[in-house]
Image (cartoon, rainbow, N blue to C red):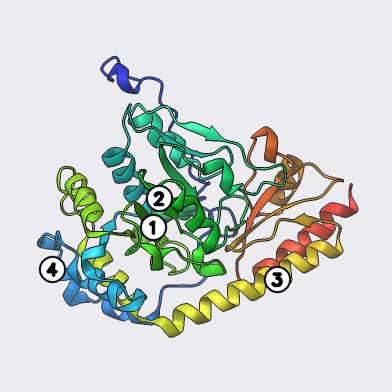
Amino acid sequence: MSRFLSNRYSNIEPYTPGEQPKVYNLIKLNTNESPFPPSPKVIEALNKAETEKLNLYSDPDTKDVIDAIASTLNVKSENIIMGNGSDEILAFTFQAFCDSENQPCFADITYGFYKVFCELYGLSPEIIPLREDLSIAPEDYYNKGKSIFIANPNAPTGLALSLSQIEDIINHNKNSIILVDEAYVDFGAESAISLINKYDNLIVSRTFSKSRNLAGARLGFAVANAEIIADLAKMKFSFNPYNINRLSIIAGKEAILDTEYFEKCVSVIIKNREYTVNELKKRGFTTIDSKTNFIFTKLSSISGADYYKALREKNILVRHFGNERIKDYVRITIGSLEQMQALIDATDEILKGV
Ligand SMILES: *Cc1c(COP(=O)(O)O)cnc(C)c1O
């Protein structure tokens, strides 16, 4: 830290991203990326002619990608705003709607960035513990009088609330912002997007990083009522009007329009997830019911930390969290079938030694 950093930020503990190793012989199952390349239509569209236009600023209204999302998800363009990753959507939401009178609340075990944004913006969140089985109890979120952040499905557990449970929470908080973070919704959960015209306090955030194979393009978006979108746009245009670069606007448009490729990739991931859960079960693992592209799993005969380390030695990278409530588990991203077979083989070798 230099001696010039504002006191405001001296105690911030930044988000720790999963490791992005430089070596390529690793099987990378630690940050929930897709194992598949972007749609061929994306690759075709990112051509020389478009690259040559990088001397020009991008469209601050990101119209092309917003219109494509609107037509695909059956919402109006005025109900969408793009973020540089859905992390930026989260940042705008905390910034726009939380302050000392409107503090945020979220689960004790959930996406780690929520806590970081609270520190960044000087907020004091209420932390709501998950149930013993790591599920969210909707009634714990009734009448909070606070801005509510729920990852659905949740990370890193993989568990999802039903649409009626989400609506139940909204119905008990008509005067507070509710952000439903749907980063993983395409892998088997129900989206709350259909509710945005019914409730003026709901924000659904989505990302292209997981189910659209574009983590490196940094694209996310929010769907909400037009007035909320205008508030989020106020944040964006006060910070970085050109938050989405030219090539990512094109990539996002092509990716969202290629429904066929998207569905194919998602269905392979779901199939590989069922395969992995099944194989691990044969070996005694307990895996939480996942509606995502990762699983959260544990085995009584090996600690989460030891299993993580043993896999790392076999060049397989997964994620382990030190938090007391979840330290027995590892989080494993679902990759290609070959990657998952390699994981199972490595697991067999590791278990021979315990
Ligand atoms: C991955 C993830 C995000 C952020 O995704 P971006 O890459 O910033 O779009 C947001 N929320 C959850 C729960 C995630 O897992």
The residue that label 1 is drawn on is 204
Q: Callout 3: few (<14), some (14-19), or many (20+) C-alpha neighbours within 10 Å?
A: some
Is the residue marked by circle 1 packed among few (<14), some (14-19), or many (20+) residues within 10 Å?
Answer: many
Q: Residue at x 67, y 46 (%)?
A: 134
Badge number at residue 274: 3
Looking at the rendered structure, the secondary structure element under dot 1 is strand
Distance from the alpha carbon under mark 2 to that under mark 4: 36 Å
The answer to which of marks 4 and 3 sits earlier in the sequence is 4
Image vertical order of residue 316 relative to residue 320, above or below: below
Image side of residue 304 versus residue 23, left or right: right
Residue at the image point whose x is 52% and y is 67% from the top? 190
Report whether 17 appears left or right of 7.
right
Q: Amino acid at mark 1?
A: Val
Tell which circle, 2 or 4, labels the residue nearer the N-terminal end: 4
The disc at residue 179 is 2
Q: Are marks 3 and 1 in contact (CB under 8 Å)?
A: no
Q: Position of residue 59 (x, y in %)?
A: 14, 63
Marks 4/3 in contact by CB < 8 Å: the verdict is no
Which label sits in the foreground, 3 or 2?
2
Could you say which quadrant of the image residue 57 lies in? bottom left
Q: Amino acid at mark 3?
A: Glu
Determine whether label 2 and label 1 are within 8 Å by CB.
Answer: yes
Q: Mark 4 = which residue? A: 53
- Residue at x-position 44% and y-position 68%: 213
Q: Amino acid at mark 2?
A: Leu
Q: Earlier in the sequence, mark 2 or mark 1?
A: 2
